[in-house]
Image (cartoon, rainbow, N blue to C red):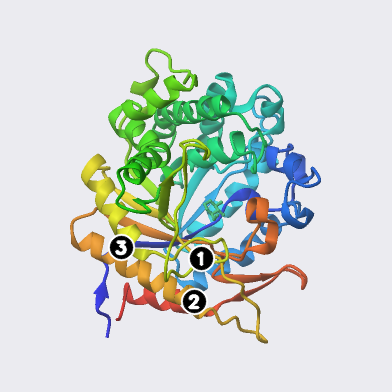
Amino acid sequence: MTTHIFPDGFLWGAATASYQIEGAWEADGKGESIWDRFSHTPGKVQDGDTGDVACDHYHRYAEDVALMRGLGLKAYRFSISWPRVIPDGKGAVNEAGLDFYDRLVDALVEAGITPYVTLYHWDLPQALQDAGGWCSREVVGHFARYADVVSKRLGDRVKFWATHNEPWVVAKLGHYIGVHAPGITDLSACYQVAHHVLLSHGEAVPVLRANAGGAQVGIVLNLSPVDPASASPANQTAARRHDGYLNRWYLDALFKGTYPDDMSAILDEIGVAVPVQAGDMAKISAPIDFLGVNYYTRDVVCDDPDGAFPFTSPGPRENAEFTEMGWEVYPEGLYRLLKCVHQDYSPAALYVTENGAAIADAPTGDAVHDPRRIAYLRAHFKAIHRAIGEGVPLKGYFVWSLLDNFEWAFGYSKRFGIVYVDYEDGQRRIPKDSAHFYREVIADNGLSD
Ligand code: IFM
């Protein structure tokens, strides 16, 4: 018996991103992206893996849409490759690139699946990087024009638009820790980038609204609740700081039009300047229709004056289960996060735009048994059901990911898909047990205990 019923029209979906699945890295006039350059640089990605072929979705999109239809997905979240559409990021439009997304959107609409587009999921045209990338304010205007080009072509059929995926990751992993493209390690660059990415979001919102009549426009953030490793005042302060760095920096900017004072004070103290100009914060905080939340785990932190900014280190966990990413399985965190974001920032609507688990799956004949992923999903579905029951305006959920894919610096070593991809055997797709479980949840619009 179904005990956890979701509201009518709840949007059950799955998510992917262009560089992680498309392949065809130089097909039909596509330009080079920073991830092409990064993954082609020896030593940057585990096992020397690249996204050159990935899941070959560029050529197999019809088969993949058929798979989605078979699962009964209501929505599909995917991203557009900027250099596929505008090879150098700012010049001529590559019509063949736009045609690919046109075909994909048509196939989705035909299958009764709502397309949910993210404009930027990290594959910046390399030519823009060569001119300073997100550290340069000029990229903001180029992004707005890219948004214009894409939404003019797809806006008649695409009514859900997210400007960016996870600005914190772009800024921190790409420009401070350097484990993501473009591989920069500079804290000042990190905050220039964070600001320019948010500003480009603000510039793109009205463009998307103008081109896609009746569209819902928003942004996707990676958020985690933060717990101190102990009740000591130092660890509690560290947790507040870490929350400021990871969550509030972006949420406050988008929903309050200011960067949090405590974090700005720390940046001042250590001489990091954020390149805010008059009018920027008003643009960044212009009302949006939804906030997308990517949730995987919580952060437990300790104070550590020698630790990386913001001077915290990971804290210990006991009796916890971890996924292949080393991330604690903590469904309660999703409930807490949604409640907290709703209470503190009141977005008009929320979506869980990513949630899932990397598990070391292996096929057994034509099946892939992944009970741990099913347990993970089940627990997180209950967490969102509880949040909805307590008034959180959560309108949909997207599992990460539809397919096993290129997991950035980890290459193909991590499998997040509900559909297994056999890269060695002609890109064979095998729906895992979790895909069959998800199909039932979608069909019942709920689950049982
Ligand atoms: O694979 C990534 C995705 O691109 C962005 N969010 C987190 C996922 C898992 O690491």
Tell me if residue 216 can be seen: no
Which of the image's four quarters has the N terminus? bottom left
Q: Nearer the viewer, residue 179 or 429?
A: 179
Quick one: SS at disc 3?
A: helix
Whole-Å distance between the Cαs marked 3 and 1?
16 Å
Q: Amino acid at mark 3?
A: Ile
Q: Amino acid at mark 1?
A: Ala
Vertical comparison of 196 with 224: above or below: above
Q: Nearer the viewer, residue 287 or 304?
A: 304
Which residue is painted at 69% across and 61% down in the image?
412
User: Which residue in the structure is indicated by mark 2?
Assistant: 372
Q: Nearer the viewer, mark 3 or mark 2?
A: 2
Which residue is painted at 50% across and 44% down in the image?
118
Q: Nearer the viewer, residue 277 or 316?
A: 316
User: Which residue in the structure is indicated by mark 1?
Assistant: 357
Quick one: SS at disc 1?
A: loop
Q: Residue 446 location in percent, x, y?
A: 31, 74
- Which numbered disc flags the more N-terminal residue, 2 or 1? 1
Left/right of residue 192 with respect to residue 446 in the rendered view: right
Q: Residue 285 location in percent, x, y?
A: 33, 29
Mark 1 is surrounded, within 10 Å at the Cα level, by few (under 14), some (14 to 19) or many (20 or more) other residues, namely: many
Quick one: SS at disc 2?
A: helix
Whole-Å distance between the Cαs marked 3 and 2?
19 Å
* Circles 2 and 1 in contact, beta carbons < 8 Å: yes
Q: Quadrant of residue 180?
A: top right
Whole-Å distance between the Cαs marked 2 and 1?
9 Å
